Amino acid sequence: MPQRGRPRGFDRESALRQAMEVFWAKGFDNASLTDLTRAMGINSPSLYAAFGSKEALFKEAVDLYSRTEGSGIWEQVETAPTARDAIAQVLRTTAEAFTRGDEPRGCLIVLAAPQRQGANPEVCDALKVRRQHNVCQLVRRLQRAVEDGELPAAIDCRAIANYYVTLQHGMSIQARDGASRETLLAIADCAMSGWEALIDVSHEAQRQERRG
């Protein structure tokens, strides 16, 4: 008779961490139940008894990732002395976090996202909300910089936030492809070297829009 419920000595947190590693390496769609149960050291009935479903397991794995491997990137956005410092810190911390250890590399929240077509909508939406939260966090920081007189009032805060978050997502793909920490730090430095021009372009675009 197949084993039901949790096996004796079941360590839920350890099993969840193993599942996180599988999802991180393979993504949601490509992580099979066989992959997950083998890594977690349990069978399918035990997985369902402990976590409810593959989707629920994935959401818990993403929560664990955010608390552990993915932590430290966004936490200091609000406390950085300037908006520029906040974004530079996000990019440099990203370079360090995405190249920590051998495998897997990059960001689980970016790389584990399933394809929309035929995918579980709850999983897609949950990851989208997390990614959009990062954009909103930068928008708020840029808006505060405008209010403090650090940045021109006419800049497009959302466009700038979207630009840097998109660049950070690209760093995740570079990391998964094997880019070194030094390579990602160089990308971060290149992105920040254009800060003044980006602010000026955003300011000018807003003025042209008002004139038009």
Image: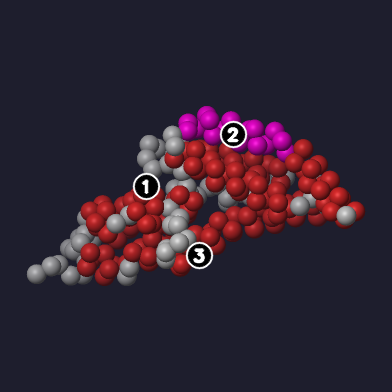
Residue 182 seen in the figure: yes
Q: Where is mark 3, residue-wise?
A: 125
Mark 1 vs 2, N-terminal side: 1
Q: What kind of residue is marked 3?
A: Asp
The image position of residue 182, as x and y in percent, is: 52, 29
Q: Is residue 66 left or right of residue 37?
A: right
Verify CB contact (< 8 Å) between mark 3 and mark 2. no
Which residue is pictured at 64% across the width and 58% down the height? 136
| Mark 1: secondary structure | helix
Quarter of the image for the N terminus: give it: bottom left
Q: Nearer the viewer, residue 118 or 131?
A: 118
Q: CA distance from mark 1 to mark 2?
A: 23 Å
The image position of residue 175, as x and y in percent, is: 47, 38
* Magenta stretch, residue numbers: 179-195
Q: Is residue 23 left or right of residue 113?
A: left
Mark 3 vs 2, N-terminal side: 3
Q: What kind of residue is marked 2?
A: Ile
Q: Which mark is residue 154?
A: none
103 in magenta: no
Which residue is pictured at 47% across the width and 53% down the height? 109
Q: Where is mark 1, residue-wise?
A: 25
Verify CB contact (< 8 Å) between mark 3 and mark 1. no
The image position of residue 100, as x and y in percent, is: 44, 38
Q: Where is mark 2, residue-wise?
A: 187
| Mark 3: secondary structure | helix
Is 209 above or below relative to 53? above
Q: Nearer the viewer, residue 162 or 116?
A: 116
Residue 14 seen in the figure: no
